[in-house]
Amino acid sequence: MQCPICGREVKDENELMACITNHMRDEATKQAKDMQRVYIMMMASQLTMACVTTHSQPQEVVGTFREVYDLLENLMGKSNVSGEIENWLKKWRKDSGEE
């Protein structure tokens, strides 16, 4: 009996299933890494665009991203999302001297 994926000779169905399971796990790991790479490329592109369009340093853009990400993460499960965002924007404008 042979594994249909790698062609390795196996003794029985249990060994065949273990081999196929290992291939599936390896493929899932590879796909997760590939997706992570895609997300990193997208984030790098967005960071570059934000820096170019706002004439800001990457550290400033990343800092703002971190603040917004934290805000959104804290909004999960809250009922008054728009009110929370409005309050955050008011505080952010005040702290950045935009008001």
Image (cartoon, helix red, strand yellow):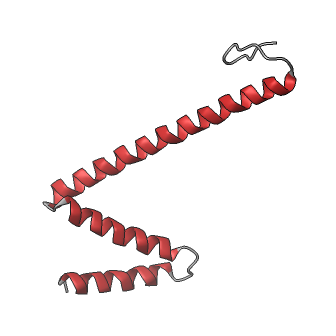
In the displayed structure, 8 sits above or below 55; it is above
Q: Name the spot of residue 32 as percent of width and height, x first.
A: 53, 42
In the displayed structure, 16 sits above or below 80; it is above
Extreme-left residue of the structure: 55
Q: Name the spot of residue 54 as percent of width and height, x first.
A: 16, 61
Q: Name the spot of residue 47 as percent of width and height, x first.
A: 27, 54
Quadrant in the rendering for residue 11: top right
Quadrant in the rendering for residue 92: bottom left
Q: Is residue 45 left or right of residue 32?
A: left
Q: Is residue 13 left or right of residue 62?
A: right
The C terminus is located in which quarter? bottom left
The mark tally for this picture is 0
Q: Nearer the viewer, residue 70 or 5?
A: 5
The residue located at (49%, 40%) in the rendering is 33
The residue located at (35%, 44%) in the rendering is 41
In the displayed structure, 48 sits above or below 63; it is above
Extreme-front residue of the structure: 11
Q: Is residue 33 left or right of residue 57?
A: right
The residue located at (82%, 12%) in the rendering is 1
